[in-house]
Image: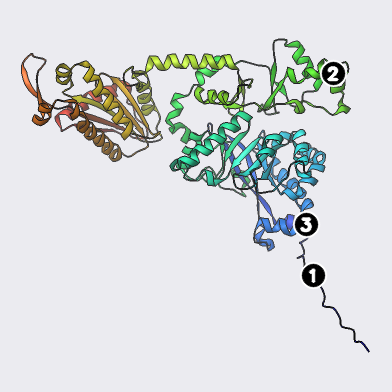
Amino acid sequence: MNSAVAAPAADVETVETFPPLEDVLNGVSHAFQPIVHLDTGLTHGFEALLRGTDTLGFESIAQLFDRAAENGVVEQLESRLLTKALSDFANLSCAEGLHLFFNVDARSLPELGRNVPKTLNTMTDLGLSSTQLCLEVSEKSDISQDSAATKALRKARDSGIQIALDDFGEGYARLRLLHEEHAEYVKFDRYFINNVARDPKKKLFVSSLIDMFEVLGIQTIAEGVETDEDLSSCRELGFDMVQGYLVARPTLDHESLSRSYESLISARRRDRRSRTSDQHLLREQIVDVPTLNIETPMQDVFDAFRTNESTRLFPVLDANQRPLGIVRDADLKAYAFSPYGKDLIVNRSFGKRLGDFVRPCPVADIHTQAERILQIYSHNDALNGVIIVENAQYAGFLDNSSLLRVLNEKNLITAREMNPLTKLPGNTAISDFIADALTEDDQTRALLHFDFDNFKPFNDTYGFRQGDRALLLFAETLRQVFTGQEFFLGHIGGDDFFVGACGLQPTEISQLAYEARKQFAMDVESFYDKEARERGSIEARGRDGHLRSYPLLTCSAAMLVVDPGEHQSDLETVLTAFADLKKRAKEEGGFAFHQIQ
């Protein structure tokens, strides 16, 4: 008799249960963190960051969504969280015209795509426009091309909802997805921001990517900006916006949120490059091209092109006057010249809207230097122009001929103001810097005046050509010693030079001045003949015509420090103080110092 042997039970993977959705929604909150424009300090929007998952027993937000996916409720969870975030955002006292950045789990995208009409209705009920919502999709999410997820993103964009690619450079690097689905924003992971100023390879890589995104009309956001050095690097690289602890930490105190952040406004004021802004040139040359609102019916779009016969394109704006791209007459010709094309496209049941014809267009702030805008053109010769914005709102359009006029005018101004020998800024720029030092009271400014000692005897003995070489040598010495954006170098004329410094201690500046004087005295010795070097002097006639001995070339420095705070000094007072300091410097061993408090 055969005995039956029971087979061992197969291992069954247990799935931990997920709490009721209502309990989860009651247990979590959204902290908001501002995303701020670099050039203005104005808030562009807030990212909603989930808080409270730890009190529900989850080790991380990722674990919350993984458990929800295992239990088949991730799509419901995401949909409910989005509604909650939209409601919190709409209740902000400063929400008008700003954007809500909401992180979405890639697994919930198909359902979010199906619920786009419902989401739009919710936003309308809350008084929000579709363009105020931006869905952040992490690059760590492996979203394949033409998947249900990408189709959902396409549907959301077609409805006016914006897209941001988050954690750029950290995951799957879906550049094809970025190109074909055209996200409005790219958020760079902190890895690319940290220490970028001291990493030439990283700096080149990031700046090249930013150039590419500018051409595509995609705005760039630097995440994790925590230090002044990070902020300075972001501005130098050309980021549009920043987000991080330096601006503001995520907060559950929604009433503390603001439409502008003084830390960035002050940093911009301190940035020396703001003095060389080309905004006055841009204002003179930008073209006042008529615009269209993204909600404009297609019949009105055709009428706009017909009424403005010479207009080949219109910038397209959202409800808050922020540019979304351009629409060209060339893109509508296929419909306009077709017997039934125009009637078909204006038919609402056909489903075509203005957003379907909007093309990306580079956007530049009014403070952007003309050379930077020219870089955008050099990457793509098929561009129609650049949209110019001020405080993130449409200010005008810069076409090819307008840009050429800006560059030509700037070159003429630069040529007039630059010293022809040393190529350093001349008296106009120096006077502007000193005027800034006397009116801006946010930080200490140091003003240095360098003057050669015994330059006339040297010039008379060795000739003007050798004298010019000495001037060029000193200009190069200044460039090597006073490096960084906190310094401004100028050539007053003859053997008088100027250095301005922002935000550094007087002891640091005086040490650098000492190094410059020492280096120049060592290097200029080679300009003398052997006998003069060995003797340490030359024989030359003085201003009185008598022959006498003169030491080798050195340089004296007078330093005037302007402390932050209220002071009544003007340019004439400063120049008078410099005259006295120069005399003291030559009498007191080559350096004199005075502080305006």
**Quadrant housing residue 88:** top right
Q: Residue at x 48, y 41 (%)?
A: 201
Tag in front: 3 or 2: 2
Q: Is residue 21 visible?
A: yes
**What sort of colour scheme is used for the picture?**
rainbow
Which residue is at the far right? 1
Asked if the residue under mark 3 is in contact with the one under mark 1, i.e. CB atoms within 8 Å, the reply is no
On screen, residue 336 above or below 15: above
Front-lying residue, 548 or 92: 548
On screen, residue 186 above or below 492: below
Asked if the residue under mark 2 is in contact with the one under mark 1, i.e. CB atoms within 8 Å, the reply is no
Front-lying residue, 231 or 374: 374
Q: Quadrant of the C terminus?
A: top left
Q: Quadrant of the N terminus?
A: bottom right
At mark 1, the secondary structure is loop
Residue wearing tag 3:
21
On screen, residue 74 above or below 121: below
Front-lying residue, 502 or 514: 514
Q: Of callouts 1 and 3, which one flags the residue occurring earlier in the amino acid sequence?
A: 1
Q: Residue at x 72, y 43 (%)?
A: 86
Residue wearing tag 1:
12
Front-lying residue, 331 or 3: 3
- Image coords of residue 7 (percent x, y): 85, 78
At mark 3, the secondary structure is helix
Q: Is residue 41 visible?
A: no
Q: Amino acid at mark 2?
A: Lys
Any mark on residue 462, and which?
A: none
Q: Residue at x 16, y 21 (%)?
A: 458
Q: Amino acid at mark 1?
A: Val
Q: Of callouts 3 and 2, which one flags the residue occurring earlier in the amino acid sequence?
A: 3
